[in-house]
Amino acid sequence: MADGIKFVHIGLGPMGANICKLACQKEGFELVGAIEKVNLGQDAGEVIKVGKKLGVPLSDDLDAALALNPDIAVHSTLSSLEQVKDQLITIIRAGVNIVSTCEELSYPWETQTAIANELDTLAKENNVTLLGTGVNPGFCMDTFPIVATGICQEVRHIRVARIQDARSRRLPFQKKIGAGCTPKEFEELKQAGSLRHVGLEESTNMVAAAMGWKIDEYCETIDPIMTEENEVSSKYMTVKPGQAVGVEQIAIGKMKGEEVIRMEFRAYLGAPESYDAVYITGTPDMEVVTKDGIHGDIATASVTVNAIPRVINALAGLLTMKDLPPVHAYAGDWNRLINN
Amino acid sequence: MADGIKFVHIGLGPMGANICKLACQKEGFELVGAIEKVNLGQDAGEVIKVGKKLGVPLSDDLDAALALNPDIAVHSTLSSLEQVKDQLITIIRAGVNIVSTCEELSYPWETQTAIANELDTLAKENNVTLLGTGVNPGFCMDTFPIVATGICQEVRHIRVARIQDARSRRLPFQKKIGAGCTPKEFEELKQAGSLRHVGLEESTNMVAAAMGWKIDEYCETIDPIMTEENEVSSKYMTVKPGQAVGVEQIAIGKMKGEEVIRMEFRAYLGAPESYDAVYITGTPDMEVVTKDGIHGDIATASVTVNAIPRVINALAGLLTMKDLPPVHAYAGDWNRLINN
């Protein structure tokens, strides 16, 4: 790999473009294929706004891209493992490592056991490594609390809270969390499934697996956070009393009737502050707060790119973030991180 | 390993006893040897206060203990790698994995390059893994900030602060940090070397290596923190104006003249609060605060025991915490964590 880490990027939507751009800006990466369903023929450099053409036109021919023998495929399309499974299998059969932002791939061992086993077996047969990652799931509600328990003698309960004031976010995000909805509209969005953040169950299962806990009861709730007495305004909207300012999604994992994991995700207009927090009840108790919270888009692009050398160097199989050495930032030539 | 993880413990001073006790309280560990220079013949269970005899008498015969073919040696004696090197070599030659709290072993690649290379080569020849760990160095000023950078696109500076109010600590700790000393007495303690916390340089080098930074200038200062206008009291002493309440040790790593890493350790009577904090300047900036700080003794025992399965499962060689998958708490039968 004297010329750099050759990678194919699959899925250049807003998130995929961020990831691809970040990799292209690092020393030691070389984009050799860009797979999309739209904008075919357009130069990838223009699509990801890297300021120059890269000589890689968007294409829908995955097989041709894989035939270029890349070191890794960076995959950023859908949240549903069922929906991306066939594509992952194609890549694995071509003998190419994968890092994917598919939320359900981050820890599929409990929720999608059959697919997880199939992908793991196939990855081992083809000597490739497969990882699902991102900020959430993948970091702030699973990997980070797991790492924090490293200094605990004993852990009895883990609560993770991710609280975001949505006032400074883009309008599509504010709409996505149901801001401005009446209770009825909110309920309709909820039933349509578009309010649900995918990943809390995967994070719960990853944490439980690390702790040696068998979750025998899992429940997840999604509710509106309503305005209190006063209006709440963002740059884009004013939410009146009786309307939702955002969403609260809570996941609870129990073991023998007792809650051991609690994940709280709240995104709403007017949260007093944004933060990510890990609360461990054990010996010792711990409270770890990331002030101002972890920026979702930047963090997902970063952790995905930062994971690439770890994935290329890892043993074959379906891995999760708890199986890999720390994924971290790096300032040098990334190709030097690869074991030959 | 159907009967559990067989381990030999070397060094049952206060810290070693804590570690050994914690391992013995976990399911899946079996102490097969306890090496000391003192209290020879006394049962290890009594020395580590585990509430029962373990049938393992303290012995100074390391070779005999290693001949029992343990899965790992837990080593907790001295801070100086030079001083423990021969003992480590004996263990490695016996084909036994090692986890050690020797501070200088936590990242010896820059400060003790020759010894690091020698141990690494020997470990690979004997197919064993060697790790130095602990809370500091080993976790709060190196591994934890390295993990935090996983969600950063770019990192330009890392500052880590470990601030401890020593009022609630034991008298030996308060004396160790120079509380109650006049400036002259403090200077004498400093010259004698007993004030210095060992590990800041190792942590600096580990963080730099992860980030791909080449530290070309390193300096470390140790200064008294003096009382201001008023007396400060702990349960054990009252410190008058003009005396030291504790110590401040600061390490700075520079690259091409510019500071890129700053480690601040302050332990003194009357600190407004205890906390551990990581401040990353980059994209994004990050501030991660562990409230009330990380308890040194509990954390070192925990991380050392929690690292054992990772060390046993790892590839051979001298590893550091940044090379291992997350070391974390676990509630089940530890023997099940071992790859066979």
Image (spheres, coloured by chain):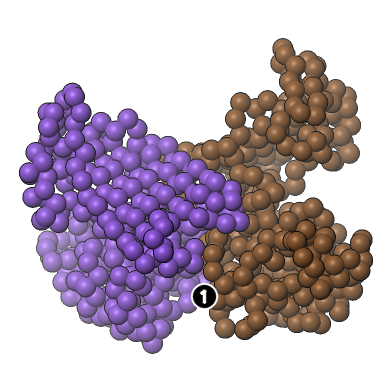
Chain colours: A brown, B purple
- Which quarter of the figure has residue B240? top left
- Which quarter of the figure has residue A340? bottom right
- Where in the figure is residue A27, as x and y percent of width and height? 61, 70
For label 1, the crowd category at 10 Å Cα-Cα, with few meaning under 14, some 14 to 19 and many 20 or more, is: few
For mark 1, what is the residue?
A: B340
- Where in the figure is residue B268, as x and y percent of width and height? 24, 38
For mark 1, name the chain.
Answer: B
- Where in the figure is residue B24, as x and y percent of width and height? 34, 57
Q: Residue at x 55, y 76 (%)?
A: A336
What amino acid does circle 1 point to? Asn
Residue A338 visible at all: yes
Q: Residue at x 30, y 80 (%)?
A: B114
Q: Secondary structure at mark 1?
A: loop
Left or right of B287, for residue A190: right
**Residue A48 or A222: which is nearer the viewer?**
A48
Left or right of B32, for residue B310: right
**Residue B40 or B174: which is nearer the viewer?**
B174
